[in-house]
Amino acid sequence: MSNELDYLSRLAVTGKLSRRAFLGRAAALGATAAFANSMLLTAARAEGPVKGGILRAGMQGGAATDSLDPATWSSQVPYFFGRQWGEQLVQIDATGVLQPALAEEWGASADAKTWTFKIRKGVQFHNGKEMTPADVVATMERHSNAESKSGALGIMGGIDSVKADGDTVVFALKDANADLPFLMDDYHLMIQPNGGKDNPTEGVGTGPYKVTVTEQGVRLGGEKFAGYWRDDRGFADQIEVVVINDPTARTAALQGGQVDIINRVEPKIVELIKRVPGVTIQNVAGKGHYVFIAHCNTAPFDNNDLRLALKFALDREELVQKILFGYGSVGNDTPINKAYPLFTEMEQRTFDPDKAAFHYKKSGHSGSVLLRTSDVAFPGAVDATQLYQQSAAKAGITLEIKREPGDGYWSEVWNKQPFSASYWGGRPTQDQMYSTAYYSKADWNDTRFFNDKFDQMLIQARAELDETKRKKLYADMGTIVNQEGGVIVPMFNDFIDATGPKVGGWSPDGNQEMMGGYALSKCWVMA
């Protein structure tokens, strides 16, 4: 039976036999549906990419307030769809290595204060115009402008000037930064015609798919761009992202074949989904973390004793066990974990109701503390806030939980309300993570953490080329965030996606969910 199934599976993935016919023949030979589908997956990987068809993703993290303007992207759907139509100067691969994209090569001066990027020639925008160094310069200028409200503003602050010089773009920095090329992978920095200054929401980029459908909060679609410059992605003829914020409906859509890939599989149902014929759980550990964020400049959270009380009042082990079900690890009130090469262990903060009560009393606060949450904040966020409420009560702290609707959560609650549940997908380097969310001038400083000493150390670490000294600086910065910051990090999560039987080419990538955001571009539809 095995030899015949091998032969039939090869016919199926090359389009010479329909999938239905293959499954029927496999059943006649005594193979289960699960085994037959696994044979198809194995054969597809062996045969390599298959071109054609429609690849659909059902995703949490979309809202009617979303935009195609890369500067505004703050949740999964706009970020993920943007990866399909836009590109940056560089791309970080699944192993964490920086790879050329719209920049062919790059280099730095000896003091790491001047960086030169050679821009690839012959790359077309979807509007037919050729991408030039001037477009790169304009993109960087727009995201450096505070009026753009760009999520990349924090990492652009160290750049003094950006200029085109022939086929290169030269970055002059205010201070040395050995990590600058990694910062260029930030997903907000999609290169657009004239930098998006004319119309940032038109969705014109250089990626493998041209935008054809923009029903924000409902459906986004694209078709393969005939003028795309590379051949290692963009295999499907069409792609579609369907917004399905409800986890039960998202899972049902995958099981029913309405979509081929879903994100944000809730850990509590992973074992059930594993039993569904043709469905494969795709999980990978990385830098993503679930958080509760408190604004350090807003009462009552402007009192560090209250912040410490809330940190000691959280039972992290319980949340990892009951929310992640083993698909993650305990957090320690910093955004950095062992996935970062310059990570340093620090004393683990544990649930301590006595210390929580001590700091709560010292803070002088009385009455309840309002915590906002939503199903879209992170998988299991509502359950997690209820567990937090219960553990805090043991310290005499009353958490009042307000469940917010998913639509509008990222525009009306996150980064606006003083205490809420949220998540971060992590960033490639410690500098980028800290620069994006903890630097005083960052637009996405969602805990309103303003610390001059931290800022000085951040800039110092960028210029420090001695790895041992740099690691020590990051360790000290982590301690400051742990002791004084407004971020409460109960856990680092695995990215848990799931694929249906028609998906070929999936490979793990811990940079972000959905293969680092490239699932629809790098996967293909099996015949």
Image (cartoon, rainbow, N blue to C red):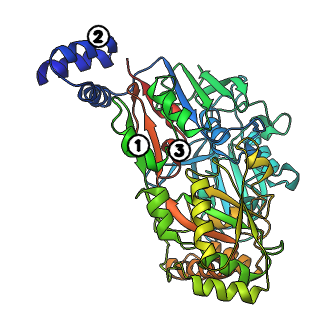
Visible residue check, residue 465: yes
Q: Which mark is residue 297?
A: none
Q: CA distance from mark 1 to mark 3?
A: 10 Å
For the N terminus, the image quarter is: top left
Query: How many C-alpha atoms fall within 10 Å of the one at disc 2: few (<14), some, or many (≥20)?
Result: few
Visible residue check, residue 341: no
Answer with left or right where residue 100 lies relative to residue 152: left
Report the residue marked by disc 3: 264
Q: Which mark is residue 21?
A: 2
Query: How many C-alpha atoms fall within 10 Å of the one at disc 1: few (<14), some, or many (≥20)?
Result: many
Q: Residue at x 35, y 39 (%)?
A: 274
253 up-or-down from 379: above or below:
above
Along the polypeptide, which appears first: circle 2 or circle 3? 2
Tell me if label 2 and label 3 are in contact, CB under 8 Å.
no
Question: Looking at the picture, which amino acid does disc 2 mark?
Answer: Ala
Q: CA distance from mark 2 to mark 3?
A: 32 Å
